[in-house]
Image: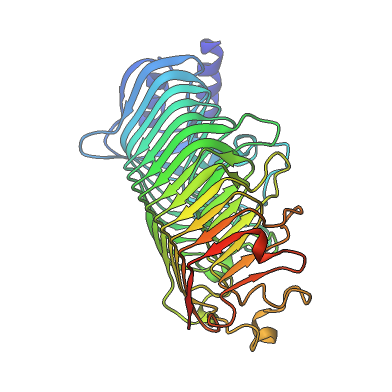
Amino acid sequence: MRTFALAAALLACLGCGGRELQIRKELERGTGLVRLPAGRIEVSSELVVPPGSRDLVIAGAASGTTLAASAGFRGAAVLHIESGKNIRILNLVIDGNRAALERPAGLPPSDVPFCRFTAGNGILAEDVSGLTVSDVRLANIAGFAILVTRSSSVRIEHAQIEDSGSRNAKGRNNSTGGILLEEGTTGFQVLGCALSHVLGNGIWTHSLYTSPRNREGRIAGNTLEDIGRDAIQAGHATEVQVENNSGRRIGYPFEAVDIEGGAIPVALDTAGNVDKTTYAGNRFEEVNGKCIDLDGFHDGEVRANNCTNRGAAGDYPNGHFGIVLNNSNPDMQSEEVTVTGNTIDGAKFGGIFVIGSRNRIIGNRFLNLNLAHCNESGAKYGCLYYPDQPDLLRSGVYLGKGAARPAAARDNVIEGNQVSGYGMERHCLAAAPGVSLTANKVDRNRCGP
């Protein structure tokens, strides 16, 4: 198998430079230290770490190594790890040559993982047990900077990612550019990374509905700026800690937001079935969308997060509620969620939209709400989204009758919150038709303009 793989790599490398050929031969060993040559090395096709590799370290030279995709590059990733155990990638730069390699592409079909769909990635790791990516800079990547699938014990630390991701046929982002862990990846950590000018999602997890959920992860201490989709997303996951991350300008540039796909940007997003998860101590500024979207989130905690917008309503074309509960996934209910000690300062519409039961909305600060001045400016900002629910977008705390599925707000505790903003002295707390405020414990909330 290895002889065949080496022959295939050599065939693909006909006409490539001597240093590229040297790297391919070194990687074929599949173990030990591969010290990359110094300088900028153009690669014509993916550098493959063969299946079954173990105890392998791939390290850049002390004076610096850049692996740069050529204009005619072919392959899933500049560096592709097909399977292995204890693989470390350290101290190098990958230039994906996005200007030459980007092709318009949408999202994969619902039954296809990204690893089988997206080309032009920076690092692609499949079926690896014990993966470390440390002190790596990735720039101009057309696909994902780092894509990890079906792996365990993954640590990505101090990665720098910039100017990456591609667009669909309409010129909108297609979710690419950042760090993606998918298809039941377990025991992962993404720590101290810096991402800027990423068209798609920054750091996220994803699995097909039929695949295992991602689990036992920690996303902490990362910084994100100018992200076109979600800064951080926990997708189809369990036991994930998202804490002490910071960011600004989420949902920028405006023209890259996937409006047609309904991908409203979010600082902290959720998708699929997510439980036993905590979002804590995260801080974001200038979010052109939602601060926290809890679509599929249950039996978890949202604590001491802060989102601040300092502009006017017109500065946020995709502005929304501060926090939203939702229930698109059929395997969950919006229940047993604790939302406490968070600050939403400046939301285009309301502070929090609540559905489901046995949730606790306690001690939050929802300030400077309703920048859109709903419903006085209803025509301009779509304030009367549902004509039969005139209070929906002008209320600080809104108890809904459901979202993707019916789930009337009941048996929730809404207590000790501060609510201020345009019209909040009149529309501090409200309920959808058929939903009773008295079916919930509502107490000691402070409301004012």
Q: Nearer the viewer, residue 232 or 412?
A: 412
Is residue 252 visible from the viewing direction of this image? yes
Indicate left or right for 400 with 8 as reference. Answer: right
Along the line of sight, which residue is nearer the eye, 126 or 139? 126
Look at the image and tell me whether residue 204 can be seen.
Answer: no
Height in image: 338 above or below 130? below
Q: Position of residue 136 (x, y in %)?
A: 34, 40
| Left-right relation of 369 to 259 | left
Residue beneath the point at 67% across and 79% down: 383
**Residue 166, position as x, y percentages in the image:** 56, 54
User: Where does residue 161 sit, x and y in percent of width and height?
Assistant: 40, 49
- Which colour assignment does the render follow? rainbow
Camera-side residue of 309 and 181:
309
User: Residue at 53% across / 68% down in the picture?
Assistant: 351
Residue 238 quadrant: top right
Question: How many numbered dots are placed on residues in this image?
Answer: 0
Q: Position of residue 10 (x, y in %)?
A: 50, 23
> Does residue 275 sit above or below 270 in this rendering?
above
**Vertical side of 288 occupied by 108: above or below:** above
Locate the N terminus by quadrant.
Answer: top right
Residue in front for this viewpoint, 448 or 289: 448
In the picture as drawn, the residue positioned furthest to the bottom comes out as 376
